[in-house]
Amino acid sequence: MTTILTPDTTRARLRNEQAILEAAEQVFACHGYRGASVQAIAEAAGLPKSNVLYYVGSKRQLYVTLLERMMGRWNAMLDDISVDDDPAEVLEAFIRSKMELTRSHPQGSRLFAAEVLQGAPFLQTYLRGELRDWVDARARVFEQWAEKGLMDPVDPVWLIFLIWSSTQHYADFEAQVLSITDRDVLSEPDYRNITDFLCRVILKGCGVRRASSET
Amino acid sequence: MTTILTPDTTRARLRNEQAILEAAEQVFACHGYRGASVQAIAEAAGLPKSNVLYYVGSKRQLYVTLLERMMGRWNAMLDDISVDDDPAEVLEAFIRSKMELTRSHPQGSRLFAAEVLQGAPFLQTYLRGELRDWVDARARVFEQWAEKGLMDPVDPVWLIFLIWSSTQHYADFEAQVLSITDRDVLSEPDYRNITDFLCRVILKGCGVRRASSET
DNA sequence: CGTGTATTTGACCAAATGGTCAAGATATTT
DNA sequence: AAATATCTTGACCATTTGGTCAAATACACG
């Protein structure tokens, strides 16, 4: 049985690259693109600044890499739907997967927020292209559902933003949430409760009837 | 009738201070505390850097001043309620005034977002003090409404966060909203539609019966 | 007008910025 | 072991950073 031999150098490279990406995501999320310094990222990664630049080329490239990684995670979440699907199931899955993205990648979520806050200079094309198309497609399905009486005739785009904002909040405003609820962290059960709350209120709010039977 | 004579110098001072605050709010909102440079603020205000520092003392002081101004606006919005009030009216007014804050002060809203994104180092005491108390008080009223059957028994804190997040979104993620909806700006009617949408969905979503009659 | 106060601004400072480079260390391959 | 490729890192660079200061200017007021 042959084990794949990973040379020391390759393992080290992977370890360093990962440390850098993690550190950079943290620093960029906290201070934004301009506010982040390569020095700070290097310190967070436990490497000399020159070494960080050796790996990533430049601050700009590092930032772009991180944004691309995050958009990859978004896309992995954005599965397709059709008019024949059950609105309740789809909307609930939508809320849950978006919340899961927030929970599992809070730094990435904040990075995204910081990028959009500054006017999304690096993400314009993605937002005006892929993401807009995705929203439009889904909006059409929502409208058809409304026509068929499966949900209230609400503006589907505002509904999508409602889901995005209410889940995103728990990453971007984590500091506020923790301060006000007197917590140190948001636990697993906290996230479950919040997600259940959002599913309940939003689904009921747009008149989606929950299918009461299965299969 | 005596008109109050404002000396040229006073008028100039006011004008400059206002220009600086406006410029600074814009730059801090866009780039965060660390990412904002006094030079950039000065240019946006049309003044030399030294002059800006003459007026505001330091970058830190300027930032604190802006945060305080924004918290003042928040507080002006946070009126008191009692169990005897009508849940529908109160919740709707809550959503509308929060949305109005977003609409009338998008830069300030983004400044607040950037501050919380970096962990709210300057706002900790406000969040853990005044604001937490305000939330707790309101939460108790919501719970009493639920007990009286005036609304569903949802967690009142998550409900408040739902309102904050879904309205705040249109300031912080304006770039995304504009890209996806293919707009240049959000117009007055847009804001009205979004606000109506949010009122409808959220009130219905937590089972608040809208009083159908007046007086 | 003249005196004192408020404002304006360029010159300047030490520190931090993103980035380069060359020299040395370490691994990999032959 | 020799040769080669990869990695590491301190020294260094031009530019920008927040902030100071003093000299000049504008203004208010007796």
Image: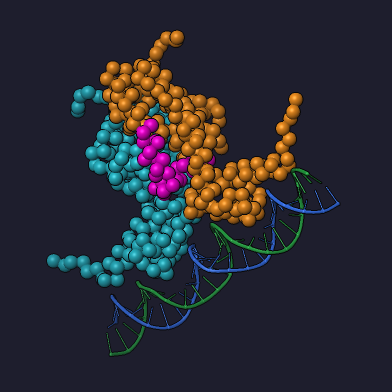
Chain colours: A cyan, B orange, C blue, D green
Residue stretch in magenta: B107-134
| Location of residue A42 in the rendering, given as x and y in whole percent from the top left corner | 39, 64
Q: In this picture, is A85 found above or below B9?
A: above
The residue drawn where x is 31% and y is 20% is B145
Q: How many labels does the image show?
A: 0
Q: Tell which residue pokes out farthest to the left in this image.
A: A1
| Location of residue D18 in the rendering, given as x and y in whole percent from the top left corner | 54, 57
In this view of the protein, can residue B29 be seen by the observer? no
The residue drawn where x is 31% and y is 38% is A181
Q: Does the magenta stretch mainly form a helix, a strand or a loop?
A: helix
Q: Quadrant of residue A23?
A: bottom left
| Location of residue B126 in the rendering, given as x and y in whole percent from the top left corner | 41, 40
Q: In this picture, is B104 found above or below A146?
A: below
Does residue B120 belong to the magenta stretch? yes
The residue drawn where x is 44% and y is 32% is B167
Q: In which quarter of the image is residue B159?
A: top left
